[in-house]
Amino acid sequence: MNYRERITIDPRIRSGKPCIRGTRITVADVFDYLGGGMTVPEVLADFPDLTAADIQACFAFAADRDRRLSVVPHEVAV
């Protein structure tokens, strides 16, 4: 899944937060709904502009961002 076709970052929209193309719905919004207990079908029903591919793009975006995080090694006390 190439999330870049669906997730955009525009400083003029939602202060530059990653959004689903053509909407003002952020990736974080989608994860907030899912993390709050909504199912994917419930999110799609509440937001008819979204598709299952949009939600999949949110997951792909988050996975890519996580892979790019710098990991700071934890110091071990001796």
Image (spheres, rainbow, N blue to C red):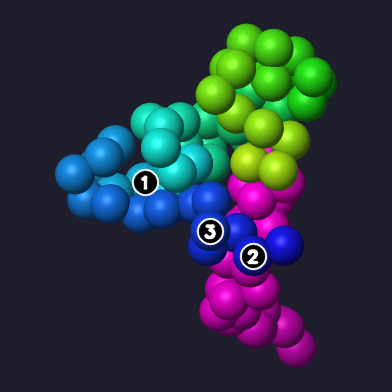
Asked if one can make out residue 32 in the rendered structure from this viewpoint, the answer is no
Report how far apart the C-alphas of labels 1 and 2 lie in the structure: 18 Å
Residue 61 lies in what quarter of the image? Answer: bottom right
Residue at screen point 65% across, 51% down: 57
Q: Are marks 1 and 3 in contact (CB under 8 Å)?
A: no
Q: Are marks 3 and 2 in contact (CB under 8 Å)?
A: yes
Report how far apart the C-alphas of labels 3 and 2 lie in the structure: 6 Å
Of all residues shown, which one is farthest toward the bottom?
78
Q: Position of residue 2 (x, y in %)?
A: 64, 65
Asked if one can make out residue 5 in the rendered structure from this viewpoint, the answer is yes
Kind of residue at badge 2: Asn
**Image height of 77 relative to 39, above or below:** below
Q: Position of residue 19 (x, y in %)?
A: 44, 43
Q: Is residue 30 left or right of residue 21?
A: right
The residue beneath circle 1 is: 17
The residue beneath circle 2 is: 2
72 within the magenta span: yes
User: In the drawing, what numbered circle is on residue 5?
Assistant: 3
Residue at screen point 19% across, 44% down: 12
Residue stretch rendered in magenta on the structure: 55-78
Quadrant, the C terminus: bottom right
**Image height of 32 relative to 71, above or below:** above
Quadrant, the N terminus: bottom right
